[in-house]
Image: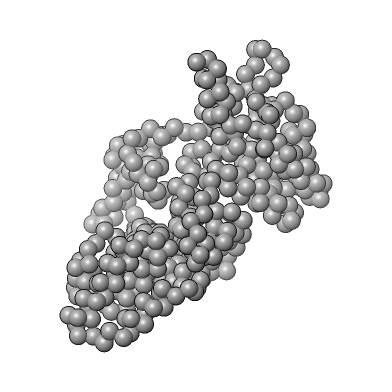
Amino acid sequence: MYTLLKSQKTYSPLLEATQISTNFEQKDTTSEEWAYNLWTDNNDWCTKCKNKNNKLTFNDQTKTTTCTQCNHTQTYEEKDWKTLQAKRYAIYQYTPGKYFFNNQTTEEIFQKYLREHNHNDWSSWIIHDYVLARMRDDKPVQDKLYNATKLIVEKMDYDPKPWQTLFEKLDAQDPEIFHQVPQIIYEYAENHLHTATTKENLTDTINSYLLKLANIYCYSRWKGDRIACWISSEIIKLCDIDSYPTNFYTDFFSCDPLIEGFQDDLLATNKREINVKDSYIQWELNLSDKFLKKSNALGAVEAAYNALGAKLGIHAIWPPTKVLPLDVYTVKKVTELFDDSELFRFYDLATDLNTIDPAKACYYAKLFSEKIKEMLPKVTSIEQEQAKKMAYVT
């Protein structure tokens, strides 16, 4: 096995790997849960506080944001403020994987129908939450929603047959039923973004929404929330713009083993246990292969390198502070851990040849990726090595 040990007594690759991790992971200096344990839009963070992610407060009357720590205040023009708030609303109000009627009782859901929502909106929210509850096998929520519609029928003297037919469809063994959730979310989010921005800025606004969805996907993956990941990836497919980001993210997430066979598992009520770290490593290897097929040498090298960093425990998809840089200095340090100069040579040739000879660059990128695939089963993580070291000392 690669135990991260060399013959020289004065050199400790394990300590070196730990140092690499420390150097490039910006430590979270705030104790508030929202910083990384709870997903938050990066528009909510102050960019003036160095190495801190302090939360901003939003004042709709003055159209300003103010940092809770350094008091830095930024003022927005009317149209920019409207777009900013629309983006935040679309994400927080319609977060993938979250119930619209979150933590509300049957009576409260009924009152929403009477006092706040029109019939179509309320019905859409019921459908969304019921199907999401079915995904999560959340019977209490399903019963609560069903009972809320019974209240509507009884108190409004409606015909019960349409509601009965609706729930029969929602309970059917049809994989397309699950697409109701991303479809409903996107319809509401898109409508909100359309009304808040100009036609000229709409594409940029949707692209910004795409980026936030991708960010939520990464966070949900870190949490092991397969359902939220699938919903986020499906909403991205629905985004009504012909742009590079949509195609990129669709390709990107389609390689992820975490959401492979998702709908089939739901229909079969198969609660498949998937190791988040191992599946992330395999995802990066899948991406490396996909980039090679597209003659993208740099993409292939980076994905394989991310897989190696993840196995070592010094790279992860979330938090966003734990990302291993793809530069000569860092790659050399990482590859030195294995006393294998060939690995660094493949990286060096692939990146150097990328602009002058793409075919040769892909050849060496493939060698780099294959080399890492051979190494991974023999690699132990920093955490495992530290545990072994502590056991030995004990």
Q: How is the image coloured?
A: one colour
Residue 239 percent location from the top left of the image: 50, 67
Q: Which residue: 56% across, 34% down?
A: 314
Q: Nearer the viewer, residue 180 or 351?
A: 180
Locate residue 15 relative to residue 146 in the image: left or right.
Answer: right
Residue nearest the observer in this picture, 240 or 269: 269
Q: In this picture, is 390 found above or below 373?
A: above
In this rendered view, identify the residue nearer to me: 130 or 325: 130
Please state the horizontal and vertical placement of residue 378, each as a whole percent of the image.
68, 33
Residue 99: x %, y % from top left:
34, 62
Furthest residue to the left? Answer: 155
Q: Nearer the viewer, residue 212 or 182?
A: 182
Placement of the N terminus among the 4 image quadrants = top right
One can see residue 313 in this view:
yes
Left or right: 12 with respect to 155?
Answer: right
Give the x, y percent position of residue 326.
Answer: 63, 38
| Residue 52 in which image quadrant | top left
At 32% from the left edge and 45% from the top edge, which residue is drawn? 56
> Image height check: is 264 above or below 76?
below
**Count of numbered labels shown in the rendering:** 0
Q: Is residue 235 left or right of residue 249?
A: left
Task: Say which residue appears at 53% left-offset and 41% top-offset.
Answer: 316
Q: Is residue 203 visible?
A: no
Residue 120, image quadrant: bottom left
Residue drawn at 40 percent across, 74 percent down: 170
